[in-house]
Amino acid sequence: GSSQAASQQDVSYCENATKSFLSSQYVSDASVPVRYFTPEFARLWIWACTSTEDGPGFFSADPILETQDDEPEMHRFGPGVIENDRIKVPVNYRFTFAGGRSFTKEFVFKKSGNKWLIEDINTTGLEPGRRSEVAFLRKNQVTAQ
């Protein structure tokens, strides 16, 4: 079961799942978060991406690239690391403007049944400290209701 330690094969799986997620239409295709995320994270993500008659959804910019226009370039990918019962896959981006400022998105995988799913995405380098996407969306969904 989920008490088994993660293996290097699991790390490779999570790295590939991260690449696959990043190359998908993760904002506009609701099947993407359902396929890659834990149920709670998928629900929050879909809420944040869904436009209403009042305008765009909660995410007004790409939630991974953190921008609407000048896309940052992927600077470094991985390697994934096992941390307790989670696998974390860091992806570092660097903006081509703003002095080449960089930031990291850390994809946190948790084993759910027999499948590794993204439980959260942590962001560092854009604001002080680390931002958990799940906590951020949870807080803002409550505020929006």
Image (spheres, rainbow, N blue to C red):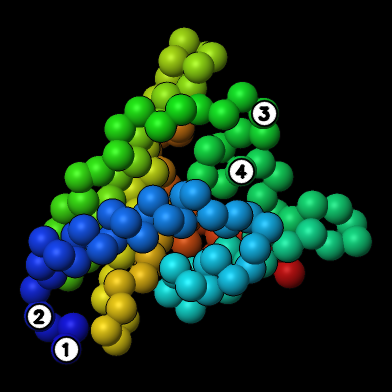
Residue 117 lies, in percent from the top left, at 36, 70
Residue 33 horizontal side relative to residue 108, left or right: right
**Real-space Cα separation, disc 4 to disc 2, in angstroms:** 35 Å
Whether label 4 touches label 2, CB < 8 Å: no
**Real-space Cα separation, disc 4 to disc 1, in angstroms:** 35 Å
Q: Vertically, is 5 above or below 106?
A: below
Q: Which residue is mark 1?
A: 1
**Real-space Cα separation, disc 3 to disc 2, in angstroms:** 43 Å
Q: How many dots with numbers?
A: 4
Residue type (three-letter) at the residue carrying disc 2: Gln
Residue type (three-letter) at the residue carrying disc 4: Asp
* Label 1 residue SS: loop
Tell me the crowding category of disc 4: few under 14, some 14 to 19, or many 20 or more residues within 10 angstroms, Cα based: some
Residue type (three-letter) at the residue carrying disc 1: Gly
**Real-space Cα separation, disc 1 to disc 2, in angstroms:** 6 Å
Residue 48 lies, in percent from the top left, at 65, 60
Residue 92 horizontal side relative to residue 134, left or right: left
Q: Residue at x 40, y 32 (%)?
A: 74
Q: Which residue is mark 2?
A: 4
